Amino acid sequence: MQSITYTLRTSDIVDFNEYHARRNGVYGKGITRHQMIWPGVVALVALFVVMSTKQAQMGVYFLVGAFVWSLVVPAWMKKRFQEQVLEGLSEEVINETAGLYTLITQPKGIKEITPSGETLITWREIRRLEKTKRHLFLYISDDAALIIPKDTMTDESNLKDFNNDVVDYIQKTRK
């Protein structure tokens, strides 16, 4: 049995919502369009302008515009998305979800200890495990997960051992 203790913050909830939206929705496609596709189209226009009019300076302006677009528009979209998520979270929801969490692996599942009580999440309920640079997400439905921020873990917590234990139990359950 492995256990980890961490603090879940509002920013972690926002990060999960953005991560999930990027992977599964229109938001992710929009970010991709504005990071790659539209700047690529503008770069092709720049190439056409340079080749047809021999105005290299105008082509450079188009390329700089494409580069700026690929940075500014996605950053603006991300900021707006985060603002919308925060607007949708009530103070009550934030108070219920943010705080100190302890997760303990057990043969039947993961025991989750929160400020509002204890819950047992069976291994069959965990659909998938996804890792990012800053988080570990244990999905319990298509759009809900246990959010584990790596940077707020207590010193006693060993995420690697916990992760290995979770993977082992999930594999045993799926057989």
Image (cartoon, rainbow, N blue to C red):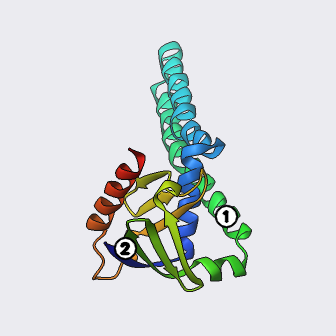
Question: Is 128 displayed left or right of 156 in the figure?
Answer: right
Q: From the viewer's side, name the closer residue of 81 and 116.
A: 116
Q: Residues within 10 Å of mark 2 (few under 14, many from 20)?
A: few
The amino acid sitting under disc 1 is: Val
- Is 167 rendered above or below residue 93? above
Check residue 146 in the rendering and tell me which mark sits there, or answer none. Answer: none
Q: Foreground residue, 125 or 97? A: 125
Of marks 1 and 2, which one's residue comes earlier in the chain?
1
- Count of marks, rendered view: 2
Q: Residue at x 70, y 71 (%)?
A: 89
Where's residue 159, x and y in %?
31, 68
Return the residue at label 2: 151
Quadrant location, the N terminus: bottom left
- Residue 70 position, x and y percent, is 52, 43
Q: Position of residue 111 (x, y in %)?
A: 46, 73
Q: Which residue is mark 1?
A: 85
Mark 1 vs mark 2, CA separation in Å: 22 Å
Depth check: give the residue in front, 107 or 93: 107
Q: Of residues 97 and 134, which is closer to you in this image?
A: 97
**Residue 38 lies in quadrant:** top right
Q: Residue furthest top?
A: 52
Residue at x-position 27% and y-position 73%: 158
Q: Is residue 76 above or below residue 118?
A: above
| 133 sits to left or right of 158 | right
Q: Judge whether 48 appears above or below 150 on screen.
A: above
Q: Secondary structure at mark 2?
A: helix
Residue type at the position of mark 2: Asp
Q: Residue at x 52, y 40 (%)?
A: 35
Q: Position of residue 77 (x, y in %)?
A: 62, 52
Q: Quadrant of the C terminus?
A: top left
